[in-house]
């Protein structure tokens, strides 16, 4: 019986999409590594504070400060910087100071990443490919960041064009579907129907789909069918149905 189940492979990380919108993130350092960290958390809509002497700022970090994208303190780290912070990222060329910050974070139970010191990290930054809502992360668990970058580039090179746009359209269609069928008991049917749309329509179809197409397509939800994109675009099938006010759409 045990052969039917996946084998446990220890030594990995639990890769999650960590939602840090409006969370307070402290970045200690202002060099090139800090610049990458700052961009990552800004992309996740975090509220970022940077602590670093101005002499240590690289041009990108200086730009973020000038544009008001981050809160800035022109000095070295102080323990009080950890007050009311949700996450800490350090990127400074001072191992002793980094370890001190790490220990303070442990005392306060604040998640931290100490650049280039894997044992002093609660989480790692992977190599990320971004296309609109699509994010793909490759992690080597701190062993080889350059290898992660190479693997990420190879994966990205093999992705279909416009996949980010297709995902955005699917997201809008899902939100419209929830308005059409909001009841909790509709959940399994909604998932099955959306899965079938994604399987039956090509990425090109999904990219081309507009708001009118979405509204027509939703007319096929109640009977649980998925017409071809051409049928929806031309409206051939929709005209054969009658209006049913129970869903507020053509059914």
Image (cartoon, grey):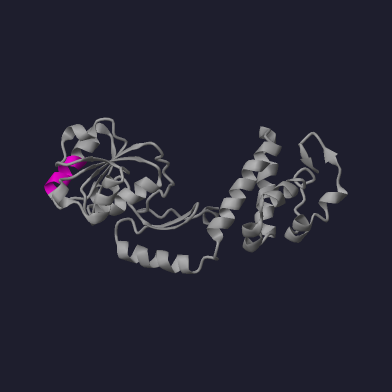
* Residue 98 located within the stretch drawn in magenta: yes
- Magenta stretch: dominant secondary structure: helix
Q: Report the residue at 37% width, 53% height from top.
A: 12
Region rendered in magenta: 96-102
> Which corner quadrant of the image does residue 45 belong to?
top left
Total labels drawn? 0
Relative to 123, residue 236 above or below: below
The answer to whether residue 245 is left or right of residue 20 is: right
Looking at the image, can residue 179 be seen?
yes
Most extreme residue toward the front is 66
* Residue 153 located within the stretch drawn in magenta: no
Residue 146 rendering spot, x and y as whole percentages = 31, 65
The answer to whether residue 223 is left or right of residue 114 is: right
The answer to whether residue 17 is left or right of residue 76 is: right
Relative to 242, residue 125 above or below: below
Residue 224 rendering spot, x and y as whole percentages = 76, 47
Q: Report the residue at 16% width, 47% height from top.
A: 54
Q: Report the residue at 77% width, 47% height from top.
A: 220
Which one is in front, 188 or 249?
A: 249
The answer to whether residue 96 is left or right of residue 17 is: left
Looking at the image, can residue 118 be seen?
no
Residue 35 rendering spot, x and y as whole percentages = 27, 53
Q: Report the residue at 80% width, 34% height from top.
A: 245
Residue 251 rendering spot, x and y as whole percentages = 81, 43
> Which corner quadrant of the image does residue 129 belong to?
bottom left
């Amino acid at each position: 019986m045990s052969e039917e189940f996946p084998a446990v492979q220890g030594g990995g990380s639990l890769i999650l999409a960590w939602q840090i919108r409006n969370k307070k993130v402290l970045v200690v350092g202002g060099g090139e590594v800090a610049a990458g960290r700052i961009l990552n958390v800004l992309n996740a809509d975090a509220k970022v504070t940077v602590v670093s002497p101005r002499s240590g700022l690289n041009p990108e970090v200086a730009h973020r400060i000038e544009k008001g994208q981050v809160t800035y303190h022109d000095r070295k780290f102080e323990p009080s910087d950890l007050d009311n912070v949700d996450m800490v990222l350090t990127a400074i060329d001072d191992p002793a100071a980094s370890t001190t910050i790490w220990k303070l974070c442990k005392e306060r139970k604040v998640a931290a990443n100490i650049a280039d010191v894997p044992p002093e990290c609660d989480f790692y930054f992977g190599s990320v490919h971004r296309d609109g809502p699509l994010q793909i992360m490759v992690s080597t668990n701190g062993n080889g960041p350059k290898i992660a970058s190479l693997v990420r580039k190879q994966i990205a090179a093999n992705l279909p064009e416009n996949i980010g746009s297709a995902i955005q359209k699917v997201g809008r269609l899902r939100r419209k579907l929830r308005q059409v069928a909001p009841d909790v008991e509709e959940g399994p049917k909604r998932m099955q129907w959306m899965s079938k749309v994604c399987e039956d329509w090509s990425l090109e179809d999904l990219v081309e789909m507009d708001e009118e197409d979405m509204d027509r397509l939703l007319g096929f939800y109640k009977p649980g069918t998925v017409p071809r994109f051409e049928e929806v675009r031309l409206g051939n099938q929709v005209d054969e149905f009658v209006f049913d006010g129970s869903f507020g759409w053509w059914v």
